[in-house]
Image (cartoon, rainbow, N blue to C red):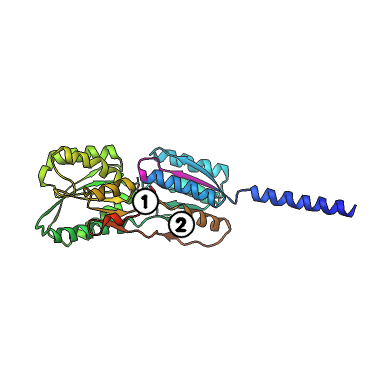
């Protein structure tokens, strides 16, 4: 009888442990912007992989580039009573109402990758993502060094920007403009909205070439996708990218790095999509009621023709 009881207790104990082991440590709702770039696809993949690594149950929704889809997804996460909500806001404005709803439901919110603009207090627990302003500064500083090394006296720049009113678009532009502001050689011929898309990068480049032709010295593109769209247009117009025009990009995906190695891109500022690990550890801390850092920026670097591109390790996105 004693033995039977002990076995039952043991079995009961095991059952409880198994149940606990099978229960997710955290239910995380994540609203992704869409699939507009290799960067975005790499970011989604990384978040899925790290959720698995950390035993986090992930409700992932793809908003297909629409803010209203992101707002609807966040409302579904609230209705579902997830432990933590995370999202990459496609644009900066228009989130206050839904964020207030999350706050009233007692669900902490993490911003991943991009920022929101809000004057309301306490809507966001933490932001995990790149320092976009610094990326713009790194691009501008590279250009000044390049212009010095080529002894250029006049530098005509066209800028293909990311999605209008998005934080990477605003901050990359601001950082770049601030970095070149003190250099009288630098002139922006035009800034044109390429929406972070390859097809738009090509369209924008065609239009810029039609208007400015061989007066373009520099193409500053806010992401690799648009750069990769623009390059064939430059070649079709009879110019050699990387030689006749200085090409500066942001992201550092494998496709752009391969083209940098061919000499058709001069500089790529890294923006890493690998934010999943920080997201999982931060969300777990929030669930446990621990304090978290308000702002987490990953380390980022610059790849350019100033160093040997052959030494760049595989990028993984
Ligand atoms: O928000 C990050 C930007 O969004 C990346 O630079 C771009 O490739 C992506 O679409």
Task: Determine which of the numbered discs, if any, sits on residue 225 in the image.
Answer: none
Residue visible at 11% across and 42% down in the picture? 213
Disc nearest the viewer among 2 and 1:
1
The image shows residue 17 at horizontal and vertical percentages of 70, 52
Residue 207, placed above or below residue 54 = above
- Classify mark 1: residues with Cα within 10 Å, few (<14), some (14-19) or many (20+): few
- Answer left or right for 308 relative to 184: right
- Answer left or right for 127 relative to 153: right
The image shows residue 272 at horizontal and vertical percentages of 37, 53
What residue occupies the far left of the structure in this picture? 153
Residue visible at 39% across and 58% down in the picture? 298
Q: CA distance from mark 2 to mark 1?
A: 27 Å
In this rendered view, identify the residue nearer to me: 152 or 127: 152
What residue occupies the far right of the structure in this picture? 1
Task: Determine which of the numbered discs, if any, sits on residue 126 in the image.
Answer: 2
In this rendered view, identify the residue nearer to me: 242 or 218: 242
How many marks do you count on the picture? Answer: 2
Residue visible at 49% across and 52% down in the picture? 109
The image shows residue 316 at horizontal and vertical percentages of 39, 49
Q: Mark 1 = which residue?
A: 315
- Answer left or right for 26 relative to 169: right
Element type at mark 1 = loop
């Amino acid at each position: 009888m004693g033995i039977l009881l002990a076995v039952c207790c043991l079995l009961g104990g095991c059952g409880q442990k198994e149940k606990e082991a099978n229960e997710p440590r955290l239910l995380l709702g994540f609203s992704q912007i869409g699939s507009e770039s290799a960067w975005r696809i790499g970011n989604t993949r990384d978040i899925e992989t790290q959720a698995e690594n950390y035993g986090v149950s992930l409700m992932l929704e793809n908003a297909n580039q629409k803010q209203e889809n992101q707002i609807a997804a966040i409302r579904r996460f609230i209705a579902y009573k997830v432990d933590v909500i995370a999202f990459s806001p496609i644009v900066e404005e228009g989130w206050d109402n839904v964020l207030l709803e999350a706050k009233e439901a007692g669900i902490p919110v993490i911003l991943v990758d991009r920022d929101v603009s809000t004057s309301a207090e306490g809507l966001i627990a933490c932001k995990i993502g790149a320092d976009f302003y610094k990326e713009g500064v790194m691009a501008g500083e590279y250009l000044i060094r390049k212009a010095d090394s080529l002894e250029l006296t006049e530098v005509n720049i066209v800028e293909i920007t990311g999605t209008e009113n998005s934080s990477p678009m605003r901050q990359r532009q601001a950082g770049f403009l601030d970095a070149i502001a003190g250099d009288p050689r630098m002139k922006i011929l035009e800034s044109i909205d390429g929406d972070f898309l390859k097809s738009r990068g090509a369209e924008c480049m065609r239009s810029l070439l039609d208007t400015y032709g061989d007066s373009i010295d520099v193409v500053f593109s806010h992401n690799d996708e648009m750069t990769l769209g623009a390059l064939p247009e430059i070649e079709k117009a009879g110019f050699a990218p990387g030689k006749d025009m200085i090409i500066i990009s942001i992201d550092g995906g494998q496709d752009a790095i391969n083209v940098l190695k061919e000499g058709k891109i001069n500089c790529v500022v890294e923006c890493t999509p690998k934010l999943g690990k920080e997201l999982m550890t931060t969300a777990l801390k929030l669930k446990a009621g621990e304090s978290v850092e308000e702002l987490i920026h990953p380390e980022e670097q610059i790849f350019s023709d100033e160093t040997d591109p052959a030494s760049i390790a595989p990028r993984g996105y």
